[in-house]
Amino acid sequence: MNLDRLREKLSNGFKPFVLELSGGKRVPVLHPEFVIVGKGGVVVMGEDDSVTTADALHIASIEDLPAGRRRK
């Protein structure tokens, strides 16, 4: 995945989304302060303080969360 697309999602009126990884794992990004985008990958902190790292090559898709799942 081109990480510029991810940077765009974080900067243009943030809406919570999910990163789907090549292995099938789904990583929710609920707030822009919970994700770090580097040169070749991302780090996401979960609600339970868990940390997920993913190489850009393993990010298969970015999907917006349904309205009911979003935080206020």
Image (cartoon, rainbow, N blue to C red):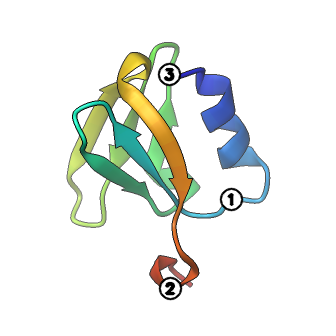
Quarter holding the C terminus is: bottom right
The answer to the question of whether label 2 and label 3 lie on touching residues, with beta carbons closer than 8 A, is: no
Question: Which-is-in-front pick, marks 1 and 2?
Answer: 2
On the picture, is 33 further left or further right than 10? left
- Residue 28 against residue 56 in the figure, above or below: below
Amino acid marked by disc 3: Gly
Q: Please rate how many residues cluster around mark 2, counting C-alpha atoms within 10 Å: few if below 14, some from 14 to 19, many from 20.
A: few
Instruction: Indicate the secondary structure of the residue bearing disc 1.
Output: loop
Amino acid marked by disc 1: Phe
- Spatial separation of the CA atoms under disc 3 and disc 1: 18 Å
Q: Residue drawn 50% across and 85% down? A: 68
- Give the number of the disc on residue 68: 2
Q: Residue drawn 20% across and 52% down? A: 50
- Tell me which label, 2 or 3, sits earlier in the chain: 3
- Disc 3 designates what residue? 38
The extreme right residue here reads: 12
- Residue 33 against residue 53 in the figure, above or below: below
On the picture, is 25 further left or further right than 64? left
Amino acid marked by disc 2: Gly
- Give the number of the disc on residue 54: none
